[in-house]
Amino acid sequence: MPVIQCDAAVARERLENAGVAVESGNTDHERWRASRGGATAVAYDDKVVIQGERPRDLEALLREGGGRAHVYFDGGARGNPGPAGIGWVIVTSEGIVAEGSDTIGRATNNQAEYEALIAALEAAGDYGYDEVHVRGDSELIVKQVRGEYDTNNPELREKRVTTLELLSAFEEWTLEHVPREVNDRADALANEAMDQA
């Protein structure tokens, strides 16, 4: 449950400017409430607490845009192809800003890795970062996106194009292959998703 330290009046104005309806609070302590998608924001005097399944639906509107983030991604399939899941984490100097996981149906490991990368980049874009340093433990996906390996599979080629389009929206980006132990949180989230698939 994200907590954003901010001026409640400024936060309300940001949400209203983005077309989000803001209502009165339910208690004397709540300044206001707003809902969008799978998230509800509740404002108090000096902070906004975001609840719900998809806090990103509101959190990205309330956080200051810009800056740099480290983005970790992982995807996998049990059976290859088989039930698949993805996980991703966005980290800044303040710690973990956001993380997510999801089941994606039946897929190969490589398809799941790309889906995780795409979801992570979409989230980083929603948060408005200028610069992303992306890390994953799939050497194949990293080298395909960087153009060091050919992408012969048509579906993976399409996902590579989507990935490059998302990366091009950032002022600066890097993509690096890292050992699995460096990517442990995204790996754990992907495995949790596969357990639910």
Image (cartoon, helix red, strand yellow):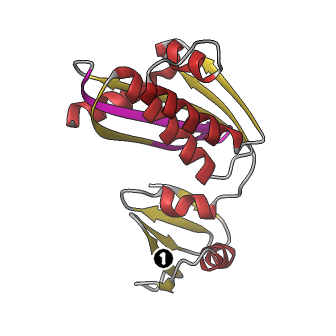
Looking at the rendering, the stretch of residues picked out in magenta corresponds to 81-99
The answer to whether one can see residue 186 in this image is: no
Q: Is residue 26 above or below residue 81?
A: below
Residue at 65% over, 42% down? 94
What x and y, as percent, mark residue 6? 66, 66
**Image quarter hosting the C terminus:** top left
Q: Which residue is identified by label 1?
A: 34
Residue at 54% over, 30% down? 160
| Local secondary structure at mark 1 | strand
| Quarter of the image where one finds residue 196 | top left
Q: Would you say the magenta stretch is mainly helix, strand or loop?
A: strand
What x and y, as percent, mark residue 162? 55, 38
What x and y, as percent, mark residue 35? 44, 73
- What's the residue type where badge 1 is placed? Ala
Q: In the picture provided, is 45 more to the left or to the right than 103?
A: right
What x and y, as percent, mark residue 96? 55, 40
Classed neighbour count for the residue bearing mark 1: other residues with Cα under 10 Å, few (<14), some (14–19), many (≥20): many
Residue 64 belongs to the span the image colors magenta: no
Nearer-the-camera pick, 30 or 62:
62
Residue 88 belongs to the span the image colors magenta: yes
Residue at 35% over, 21% down? 109
Nearer-the-camera pick, 33 or 103:
103
The answer to whether one can see residue 179 in this image is: yes
